[in-house]
Image (cartoon, rainbow, N blue to C red):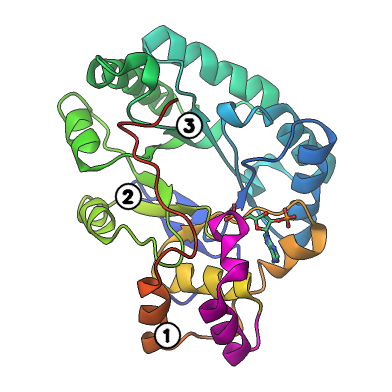
Amino acid sequence: MDFTKPTDTYKLSNGVEIPCIGFGTWQIADGKEASDAVLHALEAGYRHIDTAYAYGNERGVGDGIKRSGLPREDLFITSKLENPTRGYQETLDIFQDSLDMLGTDYLDLYLVHWPNPIHFRDSWKEKNAESWRAMEKLYKEGKIRAIGVSNFFEHHLEALDETAEVKPMVNQIHISPGETQSELVSYCRSRGMLIEAYSPLGTGKVLESPDLITLAHKYRVSVPQLCLRWSLQNGYLPLPKSKDKDRSKQNLDVFGFVISDEDILTISSLRGVSGEQTDPDTAPF
Ligand code: A2P
């Protein structure tokens, strides 16, 4: 990677450019909390905001974006299709709801949030195909600049292939120190997909790892900065989250040091320090 700032971009398979760090908003409450967190993130320099219908905070996220006064074209905004909703018309409708709540008339990226919702456990393949057809229509109309998936394993992607005209450009999965999902990552990359890393700080668990604390001291950075740099050096796109203005800002300051190849491997091989990917085929939602 030769990124020097958070607005440097990865290029998706359709040519769309995506800022290399995004601000994650999972577990940020709607209303003032989400609005303030997003406003502070944008003031700190983020230009890529990741939300989801299921987070229940798109209105607050949209409010923070509006308060920033930034031109829409300077921003990269992602949202996701929630689990209880599948089907062609249903997907078109809920996508519009997301647009309305976010206060925008297009999205940069729209993802299927999970491949196998509990409501559709016997029909996920067909249901995903219907929703994907709706997303392809929105993509072709220019209402979404790129489409992709989240939490999909190889067999979910292969199922989607049976009917998809437009191949997914992104898979957003849980990637953090010790949770590298290397086979899935290789498979997605062989298909030209970008890997986005959610919970890149293991939802905060990384802060307690003695191994990571020691390594962070070595590079004179914080543990979150070490983990985000590790993510970028591996070619993932990390989506760190913080409700705190200073911590949000600190998480963008990851371009002034380089982790050695040996330490990258050490961080990758840590086990149990940051949680793991939920199995989408048995998740109770
Ligand atoms: P807070 O929101 O209070 O800053 P993840 O991105 O993996 O979901 O992790 C998010 C968690 O990590 C949140 O609990 C967040 O707490 C915490 N966090 C994020 N950035 C930092 C930081 N630079 N220093 C300490 N904690 C952080």
The tag on residue 144 is: 3
- The spot of residue 31 in percent (x, y) is 81, 31
Tell me: residue 166, above or below residue 201.
above
Residue 216 painted magenta = yes
**What's the amino acid at mark 1?**
Asp
- Prevalent SS, magenta region: helix
The tag on residue 263 is: 1
**What's the amino acid at mark 2?**
Ser
Q: Nearer the viewer, mark 2 or mark 1?
A: 1
Name which quarter of the figure residue 224 lies in: bottom right
Residue that label 2 marks: 13
Name the image quarter holding the C terminus.
top left
**What's the amino acid at mark 3?**
Ile
Tell me if 204 is positioned left or right of 163 in this view. right
Element at badge 1?
Answer: helix
Beta carbon of the mark 2 residue lies under 8 A of ligand 1 = no
Tell me if 68 is positioned left or right of 112 in this view. right
Element at badge 2?
Answer: loop
In the image, the segment drawn in magenta is: 201-221
Q: Earlier in the sequence, mark 2 or mark 3?
A: 2
Residue at the farthest bottom position: 218
Tell me if 47 is positioned left or right of 65 in this view. left
